[in-house]
Image (cartoon, rainbow, N blue to C red):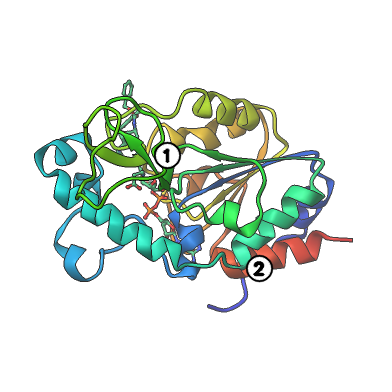
Amino acid sequence: MPGVEIASQLVEALRTAGRVVALTGSGISAESGVPTFRDAQTGLWARYDPQELATPEAFARNPRLVWEWYEWRRDLVGRAQPNPAHQALVELETRAPDFTLITQNVDGLHQTAGSRAVIELHGNIRRTRCSQEGVIIEEYGDGRPPRCHRCGDFLRPDVVWFGEMLPPGALEEASEAARGCDLFLSIGTSSLVYPAAGIPYEALENGATVVEINPSETPLTPRANFVLRGRAGEVLPELLAMSSG
Ligand code: BV8
């Protein structure tokens, strides 16, 4: 993809911003080899719609199928490495006077890259919890799905499924950051999944400068102050390099 034009006003906005917020979606992990949420799943999973599988109903109907889907994704994510986009946000966390990273992703790659404070709106596929008690379970058998050694109910991935509430406090913390920031970066998200997709509009309402980094159009595009039509792994490091010093 040819180099993306980055406006000097945006470079200046990043250089002078006091409070910066980044909201990431699965597109930021695309260059790490993790398929985005809506990309056709590969191989065995090609015939399933992620939006169907990531639901309590699917888990109730076919716990083994859903568990095995997550096992496949967990294995894939476990082999993925952070890419320059994740690393650029680690640098931004050290450079900006006040930085908040909000992610919709469940792959944990921001933490692997070294981001210290990450608001995980949709949980984390690397954690497993008891379906009944909600407690995180570190050790479990090889059942598919395994059962909780405490109550005997099925274990499940510690992620937020469609139709489920977000983790208590996560959305409030994310909204508060969006309402108080100078610069808001929406990176690698189709801006379709709510309530996460509503967060950039709170930044807009508070008068923040909103930037979208995505190779494609999204419903946010017409409202963004700047649109960097490119891949996060190329655009973010370039933006940081231009605004440093
Ligand atoms: C809830 C975890 C219900 C599981 C996920 C209005 C208000 C509230 C709710 C709703 C509402 N309208 C509809 C709803 C229901 C639903 C929803 O939003 N549905 C949508 C589809 C219409 N929301 C919910 O159910 C949420 N729960 O609201 O509670 C409730 C409400 C009130 C009271 C009681 C209950 C829960 C949503 C969370 C679902 N869980 N993940 C798992 O992963 O298995 S969401 C899932 O989608 C992933 O987390 C993913 O991150 C997320 C968003 O997708 P994206 O990250 O944007 O990924 P996508 O593939 O779509 O796009 C990738 C983008 O990257 C593309 O734009 C592409 O161009 C770009 N890209 C590609 N390559 C690159 C790139 N960008 C940069 N660089 C690249 N190289």
Q: Is residue 227 visible?
A: no
CA–CA distance in space, label 2 to label 1: 32 Å
Say which of 109 and 152 sits in front.
152
Name the outermost residue toward the left. 61
Q: Residue at x 14, y 36 (%)?
A: 60
Where residue 28 appears, as percent x and y from the top left, is 51, 59
Q: Position of residue 111 (x, y in %)?
A: 59, 51
Q: Which residue is mark 1?
A: 122
* Image coordinates for residue 94, horizontal then vertical, percent: 78, 50
- Residue 82 in the image: x percent, y percent? 56, 64
Quadrant of the displayed image that contains ligand 1: top left
Q: Is residue 93 above or below residue 86?
A: above
Residue at horizontal 32%, vertical 45%?
140
Q: What's under tag 2, amino acid-wise?
A: Glu
Q: Using the rendered view, name the quadrant where residue 205 is placed.
A: top right
Mark 2 C-beta closer than 8 Å to ligand 1: no
**Three-letter amino acid code at disc 1?**
His
Q: Residue 57's quadrant in the figure?
A: top left
Ligand 1 lies under 8 Å from the Cβ of mark 1: yes
In the rendered view, tell whether residue 234 sits above or below residue 21: below
As drawn, is 20 to the left or to the right of 67?
A: right
In the rendered structure, find residue 5 and report the number of the disc placed on it. Answer: 2
